[in-house]
């Protein structure tokens, strides 16, 4: 599978949140707007390592004893319980991001870190939305 950078999105700083991913133009519902390769890493190297604490904020659980760092902008999407996008596995060590509804130019793109837009399990930080 060929993976290319998406012209539909950009990263900006958000006061109080750090960085986030934003639509550069209208992204219609159902559009896959980013595909990213994953770096799969043994979980203990990130989650149990003295210096892995920072990186642990950017990885996904990825099978037994593994985590994955999504390249591209994949690890920079912020969490929301009312997300406008979702992510799915799209082949071996690839994730894709898809609009759940129309996303307006300049709007922040958010995902539910629980893996599905309707899962409301608590996350390990205070949610701002």
Image (spheres, rainbow, N blue to C red):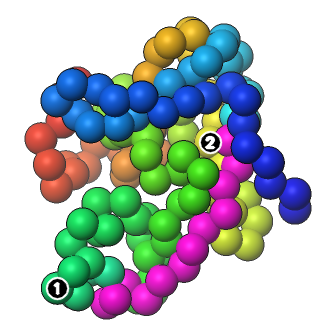
Residue sitting at x 80%, y 54%:
3
Earlier sequence position, callout 1 versus callout 2: 1
Q: Does the magenta portion include 44? A: yes
Q: Which x, y percent locates residue 108?
A: 44, 22
Residue at image mark 2: 97
The label shown at residue 50 is 1
Q: Nearer the viewer, residue 108 or 80?
A: 108
Task: Give the magenta range.
Answer: 34-45
Q: Which x, y percent locates residue 68?
A: 49, 71
Q: Quadrant of residue 105?
A: top right
Closer to viewer: mark 1 or mark 2 = 1
Residue sitting at x 53%, y 50%:
74
Q: In the displayed structure, would residue 46 be above or below residue 29?
A: below
Q: Which x, y percent locates residue 31?
A: 73, 28
Q: Nearer the viewer, residue 123 or 10?
A: 10
Q: Residues within 10 Å of mark 2 (few under 14, many from 20)?
A: many
Q: Would residue 84 be visible to someone looking at this image? A: no
Residue sitting at x 12%, y 41%:
126
As helix, strand or loop, the secondary structure at mark 2 comes to strand
Q: Would residue 4 be visible to someone looking at this image? A: yes
Q: Which x, y percent locates residue 121?
A: 25, 49
Task: Give the alpha-carbon distance from disc 1 to disc 2, as whole Å.
Answer: 31 Å
From the viewer's perspective, tell me whether residue 20 is left or right of residue 87: left
Q: Residues within 10 Å of mark 1 (few under 14, many from 20)?
A: few
């Amino acid at each position: 599978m060929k993976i290319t950078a998406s012209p539909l999105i950009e990263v900006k700083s958000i006061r109080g949140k750090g960085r986030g991913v934003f639509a550069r133009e209208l992204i219609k519902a159902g559009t896959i707007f980013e595909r990213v390769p994953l770096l799969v890493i043994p979980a203990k190297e990130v989650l149990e390592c003295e210096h892995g604490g920072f990186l642990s904020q950017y990885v996904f659980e990825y099978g037994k004893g593994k985590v994955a760092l999504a390249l591209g902008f994949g690890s920079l999407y912020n969490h929301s319980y009312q997300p406008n996008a979702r992510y799915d596995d799209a082949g071996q060590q690839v994730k894709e991001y898809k609009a759940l509804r129309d996303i307006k130019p300049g709007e922040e793109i958010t995902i539910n870190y629980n893996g599905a837009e309707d899962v409301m399990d608590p996350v390990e930080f205070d949610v701002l939305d």
